């Protein structure tokens, strides 16, 4: 072409969680049924939306006003409902004008990073959720900047690593937190969150906290929402209904904006996000309209508690299975519905394999593991040998070898069998 049309950051747009699907589909076409452990969709794994929530949605479907546009920032009554929830927590107080709806948090993340100045970097955790790390890297044109999560300290942020990286890199303008964390299932205590806020305050950063799993915490952790600890630091929390109702197909998420008057540049930045949303007119209306009715229903609290207990039991079950496997390290999840299995240092090499009887599948796997990370090599062999699709940890902006699985399978027997098959194949792979 007469001009280069590629954005400088186009090569940074990777999403291993879905990219591995392309390889899994090739395995499936060769006759192997796939067990999808790669993506956090509770509905796909058999969870049913409670009938009373469905009834609310059905009533909205019958209401003609559900089919109209919402206002640019979202339905006013819903935004006021959510602002009231934030204010009831204590801490930073906001108005309904500081709630902005998006078509899912993927839409929000794209705009949050896409409308930052290219030289303004946001440091985030490693391992990192791919949507954040790819979007931040793409906006800058460079690899995502990260601070370490420490598996030897329950996947807690390495505060000194974060502090030093912020101190000695003045391109860092923002700090990203994911709490509860994806992919590790860690939940950050309030004191750690306060330390991170202090770093942001000292270096005049803004904060982003992905809280999509905030109502899936099952350890009684002394954690907090960003609004409760942020004080006078500018920032935003990201929330939605996809994991919570759960209704992932609704594509309905929002951001809660804090202290936008602290710095004129941050206020202008938030206005830019609203203007960007204005160009799209608005986000989908019907899911927004459901929020006050569902979350305001007295049955909702019991619904959340039931799910917390369900995931707590599954986390314990997964931990009991994988903690007995030599050569890996597992930390029991405390929130969300994922667990990371971390390979010990130096147990992986590029000669290991799993027996695959089907020659066409074996050849396909061997061709695709020639130049990949060691954890991805294991994941591909696992797919070829068993049809189980997990996500390599290297796909989460991490230099550690491991993989992420979900706690979502609703059939108890299938779930236990899947985890035991993975555990057995780790042992076979490491001894090959």
Image (cartoon, rainbow, N blue to C red):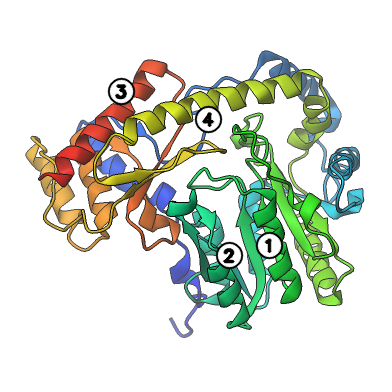
Residue 260: image location, x then y, percent: 85, 65
Asked if marks 4 and 3 touch (Cβ < 8 Å), the reply is no
State the separation of the CA atoms marked 3 and 1: 41 Å
Q: Residue at x 20, y 54 (%)?
A: 348
Q: Which mark is residue 417?
A: 3
- Residue corresponding to mark 1: 195
Q: Residue at x 82, y 38 (%)?
A: 68
Q: Quadrant of the N terminus?
A: bottom left
| Corner quadrant of residue 140 | bottom right
Asked if marks 3 and 1 touch (Cβ < 8 Å), the reply is no
Element type at marker 4? loop
Q: Which mark is residue 282?
A: none
**Within 10 angstroms of label 4, few (less than 14), some, or many (20 or more) residues?**
many
**Within 10 angstroms of label 3, few (less than 14), some, or many (20 or more) residues?**
few
> Is 219 drawn above or below residue 98 in the view shown?
above
**Within 10 angstroms of label 2, few (less than 14), some, or many (20 or more) residues?**
some
Q: Quadrant of the C terminus?
A: top left
State the separation of the CA atoms marked 4 and 3: 18 Å
Question: Would residue 414 be found to the left or right of residue 33 on screen?
Answer: right
State the separation of the CA atoms marked 3 and 2: 38 Å
State the residue in front, 406 or 104. 406
State the separation of the CA atoms marked 4 and 2: 33 Å
- Residue corresponding to mark 2: 159
The mark lying in front, picked from 3 and 1, is 1
Q: Earlier in the sequence, mark 3 or mark 1?
A: 1
Q: Earlier in the sequence, mark 4 or mark 2?
A: 4
Q: Earlier in the sequence, mark 1 or mark 4?
A: 4
Question: Would residue 155 be found to the left or right of residue 400 on screen?
Answer: right
Asked if marks 2 and 1 touch (Cβ < 8 Å), the reply is yes
Q: Earlier in the sequence, mark 2 or mark 1?
A: 2
Q: Which mark is residue 42?
A: 4
Q: Residue at x 40, y 30 (%)?
A: 318
């Amino acid at each position: 072409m007469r001009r280069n049309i590629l954005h400088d950051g186009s090569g940074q747009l990777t999403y291993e969680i879905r990219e591995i699907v392309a390889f899994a589909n090739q395995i499936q076409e060769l006759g192997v049924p796939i067990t999808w452990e790669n993506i956090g969709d509770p509905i796909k794994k058999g969870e049913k939306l409670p009938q009373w929530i469905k009834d609310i949605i059905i009533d909205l479907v019958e209401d003609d006003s559900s089919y109209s546009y919402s206002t640019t920032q979202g339905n006013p009554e819903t935004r006021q409902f959510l602002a009231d929830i934030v204010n009831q927590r204590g801490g930073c107080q906001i108005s309904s004008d500081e709630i902005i709806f998006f078509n899912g948090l993927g839409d929000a993340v794209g705009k949050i990073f896409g409308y930052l100045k290219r030289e303004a970097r946001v440091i985030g955790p490693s391992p990192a959720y791919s949507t954040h790390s790819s979007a931040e890297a793409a906006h800058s044109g460079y690899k995502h900047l990260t601070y370490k999560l420490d598996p030897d300290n329950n996947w807690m942020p390495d505060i000194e690593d974060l502090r030093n990286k912020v101190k000695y890199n003045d391109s860092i303008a923002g700090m990203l937190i994911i709490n509860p964390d994806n992919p590790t299932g860690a939940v950050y205590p309030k004191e750690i969150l306060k330390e991170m806020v202090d770093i942001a305050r000292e270096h005049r950063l803004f904060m982003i906290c992905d809280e999509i799993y905030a109502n899936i915490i099952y350890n009684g952790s002394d954690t907090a929402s960003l609004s409760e600890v942020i004080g006078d630091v500018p920032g935003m929390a990201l929330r939605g209904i996809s994991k919570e109702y759960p209704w992932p197909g609704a594509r309905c998420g929002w951001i809660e904006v804090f202290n936008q008057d602290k710095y004129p540049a941050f206020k202008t930045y938030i206005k830019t996000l609203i203007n960007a949303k204005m160009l799209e007119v608005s986000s989908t209306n019907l899911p927004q309209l459901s929020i006050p009715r569902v979350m305001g229903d007295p049955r909702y609290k019991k619904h959340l508690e039931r799910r917390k207990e369900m995931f707590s039991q599954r986390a314990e079950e997964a931990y009991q299975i994988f903690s007995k496997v030599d050569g890996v390290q597992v930390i029991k999840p405390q929130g969300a519905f994922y667990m990371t299995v971390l390979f010990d240092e130096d147990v992986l090499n590029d000669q290991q394999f799993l027996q695959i009887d089907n020659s066409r599948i074996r050849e396909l796997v061997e061709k695709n593991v020639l130049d990949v990370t060691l954890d991805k090599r294991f994941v591909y062999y696992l797919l070829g040998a068993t049809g189980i699709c997990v996500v390599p940890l290297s796909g989460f902006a991490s230099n550690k070898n491991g993989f992420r699985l979900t706690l979502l399978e609703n059939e108890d027997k299938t779930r236990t069998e899947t985890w035991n098959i993975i555990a057995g194949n780790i042992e076979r792979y490491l001894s090959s």
